[in-house]
Amino acid sequence: MTDIPELGPQEVANAVSETMYKKDKAAQHLGIALKSISPGEATMTMRVTDEMLNGHNICHGGYVFTLADTAFAYACNAYNQSTVAQGAQIDFLRPVAPDSLLTATAIERSRSRQTGVYDITITDQDDRTVALFRGNSHTIKGQMIPGLNANKEEE
């Protein structure tokens, strides 16, 4: 018997995202902020700074990928099962201007015991889609918060 109470799926997602963000030095360093979380879904934002610009004076694609990958990570770990990226791809659809506010919205498309598929749409402050990202997850041993389980009746 554990001293950690069973929580509903949304409460688990909230607790996991708070725990992850405290440890997520990359997201903190880049100013990536969590805007919403639920089981299998996450929305995160990032302001494009001068340090993120490439030689074309647009946001380097690696930063757009990192924002999408971060939303992907929060979405697939929201169940409190340790999950990592198995693979990912991104399509860049339009350049991202300096000082843009990017939003990455991750949505779970499929989830089984060990794998998942997540689509992440990255938009700018004018709600234009700038990139599309698809991530494949793999569940590994462990939990983000050991012993914390979701109350299945509330799913």
Image (spheres, rainbow, N blue to C red):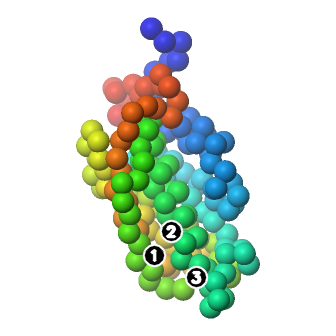
In the picture, the disc for residue 65 is: 2
Q: What residue type is labelled 1?
A: Ala
Up/down of 40 relative to 69, above or below: above
Under circle 1, the secondary element is strand
**Residue 87 percent across, percent down from the top left:** 36, 60
Residue 79 at x, y = what percent?
42, 38
For disc 3, the marked residue is: 96
Q: Residues within 10 Å of mark 3 (few under 14, many from 20)?
A: many
In the image, is 10 to the left or to the right of 136? right
- What label does residue 131 carry, if any? 1
Looking at the image, which is closer to me, 121 or 27? 27
* Residue 119 x/y as whole percent: 37, 62
14 is higher (above) or lower (below) than 71: above
C-alpha span from label 3 to label 1 = 10 Å
Callout 3 secondary element:
loop
The amino acid type found where label 2 is placed reads Phe
Q: In which quadrant of the rendered image does the C terminus lie?
A: top left
